[in-house]
Amino acid sequence: MDEQALLGLNPNADADFRQRALAYFEQLKISQDAWQVCAEALAQSIYSDDHIKFFCFQVLEHQIKFKYSELTEVQQQLIRETLITWLQAQMLNPQPEKTFIRNKAAQVFALLFVTEYLTKWPKFFFDILSVVDLNPRGVDMYLRILMAVDAELVDRDVVHTSEASYFALTFEARRNTLLKDTMREQCIPSLVESWYQILQNYQYNNSELTCQCLEVVGAYVSWIDLSLIANERFINMLLGHMSVEVLREEACDCLFEIVNKGMDPIDKTKLVESLCQVLQSAGLFSIDQEDDVDFLARFSKLVNGMGQALIASWTKLIKNGDMKSAQDTLQAIEAKVALMLQLLIHEDDDISSNIIGFCYDYLHILKQLSALSDQQKANVEAIMLAVMKKLTYDEEYNFENEGEDEAMFVEYRKQLKLLLDRLAQVSPELLLASVRRVFNTTLQNWQTTRFMEVEVAIRLLYMLAEALPVSHGAHFSGDVTKATALQDMMRTLVTSGVSAYQHTSVTLEFFETVVRYEKFFAVEPQHIPTVLMAFLDHRGLRHTSPKVRSRTAYLFSRFVKSLNKQMNPFIEDVLNRIQDLLELSPPENGYQALLSSDDQLFIYETAGVLIVNSEYSAERKQALMRNLLTPLMEKFKVLLEKLMMAQDEDRQMALADCLNHAVGFASRTSKAFSNKQTVKQCGCSEVYLDCLQTFLPALSCPLQKEVLRSGVRTFLHRMIICLEEEVLPFIPSASEHMLKDCEAKDLQEFIPLINQITAKFKTQVSPFLQQMFMPLLHAIFEVLLLPAEENDQSAALEKQMLRRSYFAFLQTVTGSGMSEVIANQGAENVERVLFTVIQGAVDYPDPIAQKTCFIILSKLVELWGGKDGPVGFADFVYKHIVPACFLAPLKQTFDLADAQTVLALSECAVTLKTIHLKRGPECIQYLQQEYLPSL
């Protein structure tokens, strides 16, 4: 072997050596006999370097996986002998191999097993067992090989992608089924016997091998005959392991797999019950005496498995009408509830989380029963109290810098929320009463209560909204008991002063809840000023925490929108109080604004909503809107001038961002208007036209084009909705600027603007479209024809997206009844456009674009394909469109396993149908006599 190249296998080698080693590996993979060199090196232990041994196994792995059928019988025999020789050496070596080499060797054994077991090596396992006997190193390899074989046969995470891989997977699945069936017939009983011998031999003197063996049993139990494992001698041994500290976690997992195995419901109940009896008599149900949380997490998973297995049995028995056995099973389930509650309430969240499935399914049973016994009602209440307790944050939770632990708790809280929702289905009255009790007790003394208890009290009120759902948030009408309870709690929340609690979690929960129950303020509007003040002062938008300020900005905008007309008495006051929050933060160093520009968007939207929804006269609304937007326009002009003069690129970027924010803020105020009518009624058209005139000059700024164009484009989108045809005079010059020196992304974002104008104004903009049609196409073609690096994925994706946008533009033009825009471009240009559509339908493997192209073609056939269509179009239909309809689906890349491709095929069929409709029998004749025979 190339010793120099092998040096690069060491992870500490420099980049050149590593590169050389990679190249060498590729070379060996395609070489005819390199595998033999590697086999010899392994069989004779030529190399002591671990990375070289691993490398040799990789070469063998590649040979078996991809080129095994090319080998002669003798060569295949050599591979078998090499692996067995290597295995024999493992027992004699002074030091065991590193784990990563043993695992790779096991994978190579497993690959060979899958390839040869059914044909050439039926004694695979017996040969390995005869070599390893009960030698600990040999047993270690044997167990690793078994795990690798299981991983090959039982791929628990198969992902189906393309059609080709789907067929490969189907073949693989059939092969794996055959392998498992053959193993069950020929060797599984012997393998199980070997596991029993290993466990018996090593359970007291080699915990590592015992745990490995338990893992193997747990893996195989899912697909072998359960009676081989679920019998007295095996179960007794496993239960014995439950009392041995170093073995009990693996034993737990193994028992979990046994319990999880599908079987007859009555047998399953018996199995679970007998296991429980032994576990209980061994003292394992006394959770409070156990302080090993890792074991308890596994034990909790086992109890969860037993509980869910019993519930599955109960469901089947009820379905089969066997009420007597179902009743026995239900009693068995009830007997586990006390243990389940102990685990659910455990202070370790992993232990608690593992039992939630059983808890959830138990509540589902109770939901189906016609009446609950006193004990069952007590269980529901106990689960409810456990959930309330476990929802509480602990002292260690870091609110300012949330990491992995915090993320896990948030996920755990989501699981608890599902339990709470299920509790509400079983007993809504009990849930409401319990929450009310906790809420009132906590809020009476919030000043002296720890933050986590105050937060959870408000959180429970918040969660009731989803747990006890109503349509359109009408929590305060309908069911009187419920409405009164919620109204009382909301009144307490807003009058107790708890919004002043000095902890971000409580503050945020307060605002979230107020917004969730906004309908409360329709019933008791007298509380609106109190809540508005909380939003506007140091508790909300001026809080010391940026996180609170940011979330409050969003919630404040939702709150104001939901109250609509009820905000009238407070509009002027609110607008005055938020004045400083509307300031455009200058890009000067050191200036720290209270809100980020994203947060300010919500404040601008809120200001717009307040003005538009007010009961003021049109003149007053116009004046207020001017007050809101004039500072933005003035700042914009100043900043644009500064940008033109700026030399430093960082300074240019900062100024461009600031200009973009100004345009974005103005856009956002217009969200308060639904259409042109409302803008006119408020007398605000003029203000927005002024904004347009102020912002458009930014398009001719040669610096930071991408940022500036993006902002102005968004503003134009909004103005097309708000000002309608009043925008049209501005469009030609804006388009001209936006088409100058543009890149793929610019064009891709510009085309939707043109599409919006085309779809909205149709023939009104026909002259403009005819004028700019070819300049736009030239700009698109220019970008598409730019050479790109072969492996530049992002450039290829940009081009693909631009191509899609181009076809979407043509679809909009033809679909808006404006085909004359294309027809009037001169014969040569029309032909060029049509050929790009044919190309898009056939040549590019992009089903989204293909679908659009067929839609365009069928539309053009519908418009031009009749007897009175443009000269030469009928010819084009037969020479190009008809062939496209057949060539596209015949392409290798046309993958019918993909949903988008199926849609493209459907549009392709519609195109053919349209041709037949327009051309009649002539079309059939052409297909029969000319086109189809030519294929």
Image (cartoon, grey):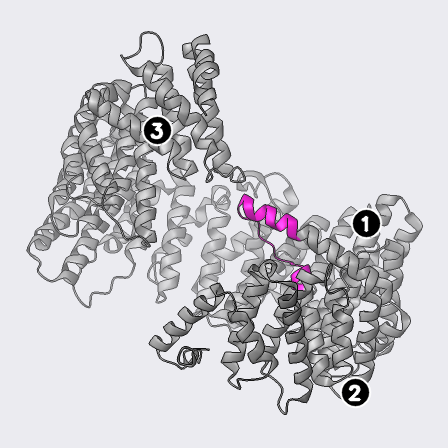
> Along the polypeptide, which appears first: circle 3 or circle 1?
1
Say which quarter of the image contains residue 23. bottom left
Counting from the top left corner in percent of width and height, residue 891 is at: 45, 36
Which of the labelled discs sits on residue 204, or is there none? 2
Residues at circles 3 and 1 in contact by the CB criterion of under 8 Å: no
User: Quick one: which residue is furthest to the right in this view?
Assistant: 324
Whether residue 293 is situated above or below residue 702 in the rendered picture: below
Say which quarter of the image contains residue 799. top left
In the picture of the structure, the residue carrying the numbered disc 3 is 838
Q: Which residues are magenta?
A: 151-172
Q: Nearer the viewer, mark 3 or mark 1?
A: 3
Q: Amino acid at mark 3?
A: Ile
The local crowd at label 2, few if under 14, some if 14 to 19, many if 20 or more residues have their Cα within 10 Å, is few
- Measured in 3D between alpha carbons, the distance from the residue under mark 2 to the one under mark 3, in whole angstroms, is 75 Å
Instruction: Determine whether the residue tagged by mark 3 lies in a helix, strand or loop.
Output: helix
In the picture of the structure, the residue carrying the numbered disc 1 is 315
Instruction: Determine whether the residue tagged by mark 1 lies in a helix, strand or loop.
Output: helix
The local crowd at label 3, few if under 14, some if 14 to 19, many if 20 or more residues have their Cα within 10 Å, is many
Instruction: Determine whether the residue tagged by mark 2 lies in a helix, strand or loop.
Output: loop
User: Quick one: which residue is furthest to the left in this view?
Assistant: 645
Q: Nearer the viewer, mark 1 or mark 2?
A: 2
> Along the polypeptide, which appears first: circle 2 or circle 3?
2
* Picture residue at 57% right of the left edge, 38% below the top: 471
- Measured in 3D between alpha carbons, the distance from the residue under mark 3 to the one under mark 1, in whole angstroms, is 58 Å
Q: Nearer the viewer, mark 2 or mark 3?
A: 3
Which of the labelled discs sits on residue 378, or is there none? none
Counting from the top left corner in percent of width and height, residue 669 is at: 28, 42
- Residue 160 belongs to the span the image colors magenta: yes
Whether residue 198 is visible to the viewer of this picture, yes or no, is yes
Q: Amino acid at mark 2?
A: Tyr
Whether residue 413 is visible to the viewer of this picture, yes or no, is no
Q: Amino acid at mark 1?
A: Thr
